[in-house]
Amino acid sequence: METGQREIRGLMVTVAGGHLLVPNSNVSEIITAATPEPVVNAPRWLLGRVRWRGWRVPLVSVSLLAGMADRDDAPNAKVAVLKSLGDNPRLPYVAILCMGFPRLTTVTPENLVAAPLGDATPAGIRTGVMLNDQSAMIPDLPGIEQLVDEALREAA
């Protein structure tokens, strides 16, 4: 197998309290953060909805959801708009708040090492990893989508 077939492009996304590693192919766009439209009675981690290309996309603070930070406000905040992995027609996109622009990186079996997070994996996180000696977490995107859908139903 050639090296090119064993690598994927990823984005290292800085969030309050850590880093997330997401597949580049899952990211639709990185936009400048704007004040989200509030969702009444939503959990703290569901920051509201942002407007993007005619969509009202739910904005999630993975840091608040996972308990990695008590607050999530950054002066250079960006929003990563992600394609939903589920087949929910009401939720084609989910956005996550990030600090600055994510960094494009190459992920190979040689530079990615599992780094389990212990007995209690935080909400919204699938597992921990080390990528080129930098710790990161793989978000549980389907789980986050389900939590967002449930929160939006309860808030309605």
Image (cartoon, rainbow, N blue to C red):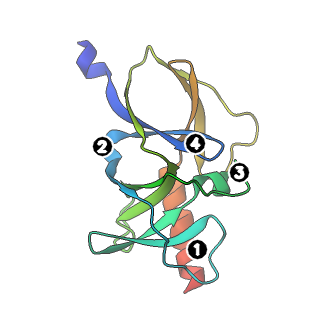
Disc 4 crowd rating (10 Å Cα; few below 14, some 14-19, many 20+) is: some
Could you tell me how far apart the alpha carbons at marks 3 and 1 are, in whole angstroms?
Answer: 20 Å
Q: Label 1 near label 3: C-beta < 8 Å?
A: no
Type of the residue with mark 1 = Ala
Disc 1 crowd rating (10 Å Cα; few below 14, some 14-19, many 20+) is: some
Q: Earlier in the sequence, mark 3 or mark 2?
A: 2
Disc sitting over residue 25 in the figure: 2
Q: Earlier in the sequence, mark 4 or mark 3?
A: 3
Q: Residue at x 53, y 48 (%)?
A: 140
For discs 3 and 2, the disc positioned in front in the rendered view: 3
Helix, strand or loop at label 1? It is: helix
Counting from the top left corner in percent of width and height, residue 116 is at 66, 30
Disc sitting over residue 69 in the figure: 3
| Residue in front for this viewpoint, 125 or 52 | 52
Q: Is any part of residue 1 visible from this angle?
A: no
Rendered view: 75 above or below 46: above
Counting from the top left corner in percent of width and height, residue 27 is at 34, 49
Q: Earlier in the sequence, mark 3 or mark 1?
A: 3
Q: Residue at x 74, y 33 (%)?
A: 118
Q: Earlier in the sequence, mark 4 or mark 2?
A: 2
Helix, strand or loop at label 4? It is: strand
Quarter containing the C terminus:
bottom right
Disc 3 crowd rating (10 Å Cα; few below 14, some 14-19, many 20+) is: some
Type of the residue with mark 2 = Ser
